[in-house]
Image: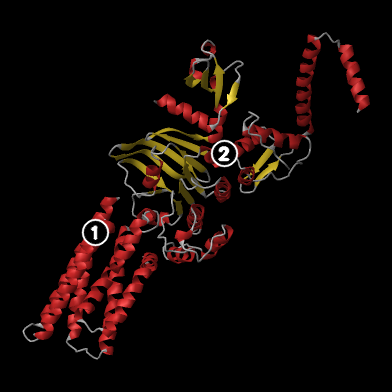
Amino acid sequence: MNAIELKRVTKNYGAFSLKDITLSLPSGCILGLVGENGAGKSTTIRLLLNAAARDAGEITVLGRDVRKKEFRRVKEQIGVVLDEAYYPDVLSAGNVNLIMKHIYRSWQEDIFYDYLKRFALSEKKLFKEYSRGMKMKLAIAAALSHQPKLLVLDEATSGLDPVIRDEILEIFNDFTRDEDHSVLLSSHIISDLEKISDYIAYLHQGKLVFCEEKDRLLEEYGILHTTSAGLSDVPKDAIEAKRQGRYSTEVLVRRSRLSGAFDVEPANLEDIMLFMAKKGE
Amino acid sequence: MEILIKNSSGQPIYEQIYTQIKDLILNGALAEGDALPSIRGLAKDLRISVITTKRAYDELEREGFVNTVAGKGCFVAGTDRELIREEHLKKIETHLQAISQLAKSCGITNEELIEMFRILEVEE
Amino acid sequence: MKGLLIKDAFTMMKETKYFFILAVVMMFLQNDFLFSYIIVYAAMLPMAAQAYDERVKWDKMAQTLPLTVDQIVGSKYIMGYLSAFAAVLMVLAARLLGRSFRAEEFGMLLIVVCVALVVQALNIPLMFWIGVERGRLLFIILVIGAAMAASSIWQEAITAPLTLNIRLLLSAAFGVTVIVNIISFYLCRIVYNRKQ
């Protein structure tokens, strides 16, 4: 079963539009949503939480159409962390517990307090006295404390220091030990996504460039350094994109279409994305 | 059991898992009937993709090294000695081919090679 | 829904302090305008909570929670009703303490509450529409105007109780308040949905 499924989804917002997005997140997996600022990551997330209405296409989350009335019940099972924790700043973590207890039927106080302890968050301290890292941790604690089956995180780790980021990624990694648990994680920090994602979806200027299994991407694509003369030896259909410099040429190649001895270097996700973005323009 | 994943090796991760588990089975570190870690558990502990881990396990099953029991997990299959022997023979053959090529390229005779091998054995 | 009310109660806490100070002052100054003002003010208290929501962009968060638009919008109305009710209790207590309470004032108190709730009904959709920050001046004018209106109706009725049919006046006020609130609620839903 797919935890998230988008079929040919389109949304127009004046100058910006999200065009014909088709992607899915299989249950039990982590999908990383990458793209530059303004690529459409947040819009995609708003659409699949029914915080905005799509103009065309189909969206189902945990098996339910998000536009249906019953979707509110489904939201009980989704833990969401946005780019910022939008809590009134006069609240304390204890207040948040009291509020969420009456919003989520499946709220688990003891789990919430466990996370507070684990994250070293004080129960009494007011939200406005929290650092950004603490705020995000509080939001993550809240997102994990109502037995969610799906976590949706929109830039939840950006602006945090690497040690905290790693700690948080580890929690998401652990969360998917249960095969009914899935995670959608958007970020422009590609290394974070490369670390924990099973699938990577790349949005660029409102369009989906690819949605692929991460390791297959890394296995398939490689970088070949060559001269303009050497380029003619490379089979045409193996060349995905190229970057022509004055003194040398870098080519993103598909290994499966390459025969013979080429000295192909491994490409990381960032390389692949940069090449693909260039190619699209 | 221990599995080492190297991101820099250029060898696909599923292949690294596949070969390492296969080697553990072939050299007897994993015996028939031993349970393999769950796909999910192994993937999460190694911090690698679940799908990739599954791919390695599928490959192992296809090659007959492990059996999957629905709802229980993966177990080392009863590999018969013949199969292991064959595997080893294949490996030796490839090494020998490399040796004979090297020897030819610098004019070492077969007699000299055999002599070298004897000396090695004595030293060990 | 209850969760939203609790949240609003927490964010209103600060404003409520001034409210209580005002209530204590009122106990000593037996002033009719002040009595009306405090009831109207009470009905407006949820605006403070809404201002907070707006400043921290709470609606972004609310959209991710298992809440309906009815609950998000409705909680603001209920909060207003609750705090108006609390204010009425305080006014009654102050009147009884000052021993200046007369039986017919009971009806007048109801009128003031009706005026307060009509103002609230005008106010909430407006606040959802243009926002509390920008609607602040409008809000102050509405409160003062309403307090003056309520207090003058009260004065009128106290000085000339026989010329007015109290019962008719009360039912009319109550009816109008209910209708205005229902219309306001639906309007507010439309405004909220469109903003999405």
Q: Is residue C112 left or right of residue A242?
A: left
**Residue A81, horizontal then vertical, whole percent:** 45, 51
Residue in view at x 28 percent, y 84 percent: C27
Neighbour tally class for label 2: few under 14, some 14-19, many 20 plus, Cα within 10 Å: many
The answer to whether tags 1 and 2 share a subunit is no
The kind of residue on which mark 1 rests is Gly
Which three-letter amino acid code belongs to the residue tagged 2?
Ile
Secondary structure under tag 2 reads helix
Q: Relative to residue C131, is residue C8 depicted above or below?
A: below
Residue at 79% from the left image edge and 29% from the top image edge = B85
Q: Could you classify mark 1 by the number of other residues whose Cα lies within 10 Å: few (under 14), some (14-19), or many (20 or more)?
A: some
In the figure, is residue A191 to the left or right of C142? Answer: right
Closer mark to the observer between disc 1 and disc 2? 1
- Mark 1 and mark 2: Cα distance apart in space: 54 Å
The residue under label 1 is C135
Residue contact at pointers 1 and 2, CB within 8 angstroms: no
Image mark 1: chain = C
Q: Which residue is mark 2?
A: B51
Residue C70 image position (x, y, % from top left): 30, 61
Q: Position of residue C108 (x, y in %)?
A: 17, 81
Label number found at residue C59: none
Q: Quadrant of residue A261?
A: top right
The colour mode here is secondary structure
**Chain name for mark 2:** B
- Among all residues in the image, which is located at the extreme left? C163
Q: Nearer the viewer, residue A92 or A62?
A: A92
- Front in this rendered view, residue C48 or B114: C48
